[in-house]
Image (spheres, rainbow, N blue to C red):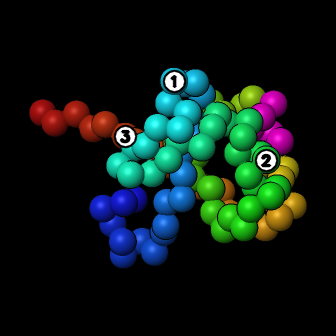
Amino acid sequence: LLRNPQMGLTVVGFLDDDPYLLGQHIHDVEVLGNAAKLVELCRTRQIDEVIVTSNLLLSTQTGVQLLEVCRGKGIKMKLLRLELESIE
């Protein structure tokens, strides 16, 4: 995302459930909290789009809450998938 400005996206923060990453920076972007924090951020900040990198989140209570909040506020949600293809 950071290397593809033509996508028109601005990364404002990362979320990670690892408590040791809280407050750290990944590629100069701050880790703002864990997945539960995302629900709060969607309620309190102007967010246009959320990109989820784990479909496991969507099967949790937090993920269901997040979907509801995003739908209610008109926030787009996308799942970023990484696929590996064998080369033979």
In which quarter of the view is residue 74 placed? bottom right
Residue underneath mark 2: 40
Which residue type does callout 1 highlight?
A: Tyr
Depth check: give the residue in front, 47 or 30. 30
Looking at the image, residue 42 sits to the left or right of residue 86; the answer is right
Q: Which circle, 2 or 1, is nearer the viewer?
A: 1
Chief secondary structure of the magenta portion? helix
Residue underneath mark 3: 83
Q: Is residue 29 magenta?
A: no
In the rendered image, is residue 70 in sight? no
Query: Which segment did they paint magenta?
Result: 61-66
In which quarter of the view is residue 62 placed? top right
At 45% from the left and 51% from the top, the residue drawn is: 29
Depth check: give the residue in front, 14 or 58. 14
Which residue type does callout 2 highlight?
A: Glu
Counting residues from the N terminus, which is met first, the one under dot 2 or under dot 3? 2
Instruction: Determine contact: label 2, label 3, CB under 8 Å.
Output: no
In the rendered image, residue 80, in percent from the top left (x then y), is placed at: 49, 49
**Quick one: label 3, few (<14), some, or many (20+) residues within 10 Å?**
few
In whole angstroms, how far apart are the C-alphas of marks 2 and 3?
30 Å
Residue underneath mark 1: 20
Q: Is residue 44 above or below residue 35?
A: below
Which residue type does callout 3 highlight?
A: Glu
Counting residues from the N terminus, which is met first, the one under dot 2 or under dot 1? 1
In whole angstroms, how far apart are the C-alphas of marks 2 and 1?
20 Å
Looking at the image, residue 65 sits to the left or right of residue 41; the answer is right
* Quadrant for the C terminus in the image: top left
